[in-house]
Amino acid sequence: MIRGMTGQASLRFSTDTFDVEMEIRSVNSRYFEFRLKCPSRYYALEIGARKLISKKLARGKVDLSLRINEKEVLSKSSLINKPLAKAYLEESQKLAQELNISDIITMRELLSLPQVLNVDMSDVDESVLKLFLDKLDVLIDQMLPMMMTEGESTVNDVNASLTTMENSLSFIKKQYPQVLEKYKENLKERVREVTQTKTPEERLSVEVELFASRTAINEEVVRLDNHIRVMKDILVGKRKDGSKELDFIGQEMNREVNTIASKSSDFEITEQTIILKSEVEKMREQFRNIV
């Protein structure tokens, strides 16, 4: 199914050792981009999270945020490196005496010095990482309905464009034979004005055929019709992984429309090619936002 790339979801869960809030956000991107924001000791989660998100979302710029409150951190290790803090304090006091300045170091400044404030940097247990990935899987599933809604809206817009294109093509199919007939009548009239005689039918047929060969658009119209049919099949899911083909088909549509426009000598047909080109460009913009 066609879906968008924009979405957001969050969830909270708790265990005996921590409280966690997870949030995921995704926006449009031509490629897959992933960024993880979490406490440094949990960065081992990044590889598994990247693999899971890439598999389920394929494209998009995705941000995953984890806010983790460890309930037992104080029992695991001392948060403050007291020997180091004392050493910093003693050295600062000595320096203050030598320089004859007042010793005004504050507790906040002391705790901000390198390695004074400890954080338990031991490896996170594999079972914890698996729990987080399981929760991430649930979180992605919570976000998918928003993406599906965006995809449905995009499909409706693209179908509207395809209908407009079909109407323009239908007009061109009816108009082109009239263009040939009009050319034939104009040619007869010009010859009559110059020679005051009737144009030989054989010669007239040759000239019309030459004109038709220069302006023939039947092949382009047939291919454009086929592109529209294939695109409709993709939008309703008849072709597996067809969404990857949409922009390529859009390029081919654009090529056919440009060829029709370059061959056309009729104002009304040219006017319809402008409409066709506009709709193709509109669809290609939409294709950048869906998977």
Image (spheres, rainbow, N blue to C red):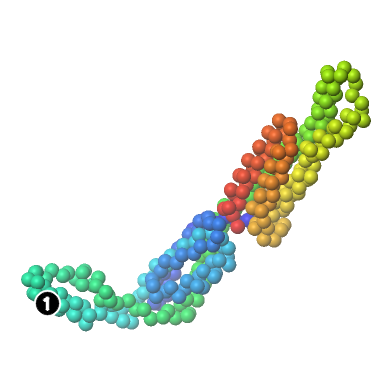
| Horizontal relation, residue 149 to residue 99: left or right | right
In which quadrant of the rendered view does residue 187 lie? top right
**278 vs 108, nearest the viewer:** 278
* Vertical comparison of 15 with 197: above or below: below
| Horizontal relation, residue 272 to residue 126: left or right | right
Residue appearing at x 83%, y 18% in the figure: 193
Q: Is residue 233 visible?
A: yes
* Quadrant showing the C terminus: bottom right
The 10 Å Cα crowd at callout 1, few under 14, some 14 to 19, many 20 or more, is few
Residue appearing at x 85%, y 35% in the figure: 209
In which quadrant of the rendered view does residue 198 lie? top right
* Vertical comparison of 101 with 268: above or below: below
Kind of residue at badge 1: Lys
Residue appearing at x 11%, y 73% in the figure: 96
Q: Residue furthest front?
A: 195
Q: Is residue 154 visible?
A: no
* Vertical comparison of 164 with 291: above or below: above
**Residue 28 picture location, percent across and down:** 53, 55
* Quadrant showing the N terminus: bottom right
**Residue 261 picture location, percent across and down:** 70, 38
Q: What residue is shown with label 1? A: 94
**Residue 158 picture location, percent across and down:** 64, 47
Residue appearing at x 42%, y 74% in the figure: 42
How many marks the image carries: the answer is: 1
Find numbered disc 1 in the image and state the secondary structure of the residue it sits on.
helix
**205 vs 168, nearest the viewer:** 205
**257 vs 75, nearest the viewer:** 257
**Residue 97 picture location, percent across and down:** 8, 74
